[in-house]
Image (spheres, rainbow, N blue to C red):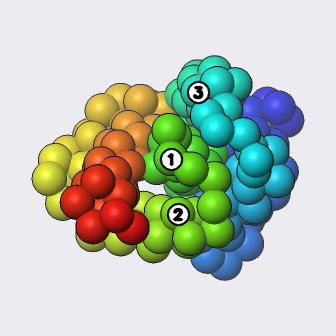
Amino acid sequence: MWFHKTAASIFGIGYCKGGGTLAAIACCICWYLAWSGHPFPTYALVITGIIIGIGIWAGNNVEAQWGKDSSRVVIDEVAGMAITLLFLPVTVKYIIAGLALFRFFDIVKPFYIKRMEKLPGGWGVMFDDILAGVYSNIVLWIAVIVFHF
């Protein structure tokens, strides 16, 4: 159970006030440090998939003790933030814009995001943030293509 709690809370970030935002910011910092200077970090896609898998697994296991979609579970924010930044240039501008967009979609939960929470166990925990990340990524790409952002 220690592994599941540690992974789900991203090494304890989930225990902090504003843990979801802090986890998303931590993801942004790690993303920049890991992938800055790479045209397309192929490993980022693989690592994002691994985070999603661990999040579903950990979410399923901590639900019995912490309850459904506990605020202590913040691995979903990390997965959503990573999806937001996939395939985009790794610059401070895109990371900050991605963070703002992801938090917007994650908090407001428009366009079926809220419905994803109804999925069972770790699937529901993860998929609302995954969808928020997909929407954020699409909006960023539109900004890149249309507005040359």
Mark 3 → mark 2, Cα distance in angstroms: 17 Å
Q: Please identify the quarter of the rendering in which residue 105 is found.
A: bottom left
> Residue 79: x percent and y percent?
56, 42
Q: Residue sitting at 64 percent across and 24 percent down?
A: 42
Q: Residue sitting at 58 percent across and 63 percent down?
A: 95
Q: Sequence order check: which comes first, mark 2 or mark 1?
A: 1
Q: Name which residue type carries label 2.
A: Tyr
Figure check: 48 above or below 108: above
Q: Which residue is mark 1?
A: 88
Q: Name which residue type carries label 1.
A: Leu
Q: Sequence order check: which comes first, mark 3 or mark 2?
A: 3
Q: Please identify the quarter of the rendering in which residue 142 is found.
A: bottom left
> Residue 13: x percent and y percent?
76, 62
Q: Residue sitting at 34 percent across and 51 percent down?
A: 141
Mark 1 → mark 3, Cα distance in angstroms: 12 Å
Q: Please identify the quarter of the rendering in which residue 26 is found.
A: bottom right
> Residue 73: x percent and y percent?
61, 50
Figure check: 62 above or below 73: above
Q: Which residue is mark 2?
A: 94
Label 3 Cα neighbours within 10 Å, binned few <14 / some 14-19 / many ≥20: some
Q: Helix, strand, or loop for circle 3?
A: helix
Q: Residue sitting at 82 percent across and 53 percent down?
A: 33
Q: Helix, strand, or loop for circle 1?
A: loop
Q: Sequence order check: which comes first, mark 1 or mark 3?
A: 3
